[in-house]
Image (tube, grey):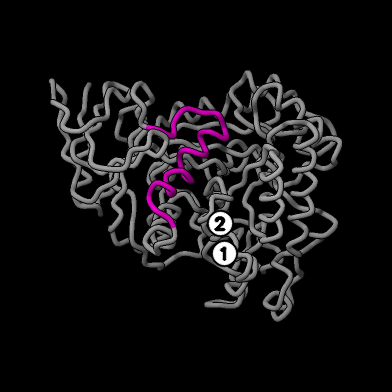
Amino acid sequence: MKRLLKGGRVVDPANGRDGVFDVLVDGDRIARVAKDLPADGATVVDVPAGFIVCPGLIDMHVHLREPGQEHKETVATGVASAVAGGFTAVACMPNTTPVNDNAGVTEFILKKAAAANLARVYPIGAVSKGSDGEHLADIAELRAAGCVGLSDDGRPVKTALLMRRALEYAGMFGMPVLEHCEDPSLKGDGVAHEGYHASALGLRGIPDVAESIMAQRDIALAELTGGTVHICHMSAATTLRAVRAGKRHGVKVTCEVAPHHFTLTDETLASPVSYDTNAKMNPPLRAAADRDEMIRGIVDGSVDAIATDHAPHHYDEKKVEFDRAPFGIVGLETCVSISLDRLVHAGLIGLPRFVELLSVNPARILGVPGGSLTEGAVADITILAPDLRVTVDASAFRSKSKNTPFGGWQLRGGVAATIVGGRTVYTNDAASGAERFQ
């Protein structure tokens, strides 16, 4: 089947395109991108005025919870949430039950993803067996089974020696190590950012240096080994300072920031509702100065990717005392609207930079297909409605969990349609004209 997406604004920074072009999709591939292409037997889809056609978005940090925690999320509900959020692919972290530290778990996840037949799923394998920080997992086995990176996410890699070995072995397979940076001795039993608001509420604090000290360790080890380290869900200005220094010295270090860390601060702990467990995440919401530095990093290019750290939890698990609640929020279905509203429409970045952060760079860091509309590439395409008015309604999420601090937010910009392998897997009824992509 051929389809000609005609007249949309194509934003494809990998190929230097930003303008009105036609995109010819032949089966599951991009056939041509040019101006005024003839139909030649293709079904013509007139892209509504103002809509953006860009490479499929990739979220390089999500938790799909299956196997073992299906009451929070499953692979099927997670990828349904992903395509509703405009993501054609997601990378899922290994802190499942059992941990994804062997080929059997990896193959199970991929089998579930194939059955769901929505977004592509790229498993991240555990650095250590059981993510216990003692012994390396069989990295060759994980790579052969389909893992594209390694992480003990939810926990930092326990020792410098283990991290060194992980970087060395992962480097042999061209895989990055994605690190949850946190010094456990400094974090202790903290539940919120160490600062005025946590103190006022009587909450135990986590200092920003708990993150940056571990990031400095890992950047130094990446320099030593020549391996690639990716700093997950960066939240602290001191961490960004370490990343910038590493990049200046030629270290293979990349980083991501989540939407909640470039929009919210620790003031959310007390406002609008005190002790709201949807304001509890790890790393925690930081001070305004940290939030502002995350934005500066996004603007100046120091930050490589925006990733959601989609962390679904059941209602009952979050509806407890703040200290007892699990860390994390869902993010797949709010990321695009928040990023468009708070970054693009705020005049901080342009759409090409938006696509770099959410498509080009995640594909490059993980070494997976996508990130461009190059002829012959997989036809993974996200259609954006940049002026769509969106009100965040958690009850309408396709995710199994609804734990978000963004409920009721009114935002400008959203997803019109999501196309994976040339097949439309989602259209947004609220975006007038999106039905044309079916």
Looking at this view, name the residue that lies furthest to the bottom.
200
Which residue is under mark 2?
329
Whole-Å distance between the Cαs marked 2 and 1?
6 Å
Q: Is residue 137 magenta?
A: no
Q: Quadrant of residue 142?
A: top right
User: Which amino acid type is marked by label 2?
Assistant: Ile
User: Of the numbered discs in the image, which one, if any, rests on residue 238?
Assistant: none
For label 1, the crowd category at 10 Å Cα-Cα, with few meaning under 14, some 14 to 19 and many 20 or more, is many
Provide the secondary structure element on which disc 2 rests. loop
Q: Quadrant of residue 423?
A: top left
Residue 255 locus on image (x, y percent): 62, 46
Q: Quadrant of residue 13?
A: top left
Provide the secondary structure element on which disc 1 rests. helix
- Dot 2 or dot 1: first in sequence order is 1
Residue 329 locus on image (x, y percent): 56, 56
Q: Magenta: predominant secondary structure element?
A: helix
**What residue range appears in magenta?**
349-372
Residue 367, above or below 11: above
Q: Quadrant of the N terminus?
A: top left
Look at 68% across and 49% down and name the residue there. Answer: 243
User: Of the numbered discs in the image, which one, if any, rests on residue 278?
Assistant: 1
Residue 224 locus on image (x, y percent): 80, 34
300 vs 152, left or right, is left
Badge 2 vs badge 1, beta-carbon distance below 8 Å:
yes
Residue 381 locus on image (x, y percent): 34, 36
299 vs 56, left or right, is right
Q: Quadrant of the C terminus?
A: top left
55 vs 286, left or right, is left
Look at 71% across and 59% down and name the residue there. Answer: 238
Look at 13% across and 21% down and name the residue there. Answer: 40
For label 2, the crowd category at 10 Å Cα-Cα, with few meaning under 14, some 14 to 19 and many 20 or more, is many
Q: Is residue 351 magenta?
A: yes
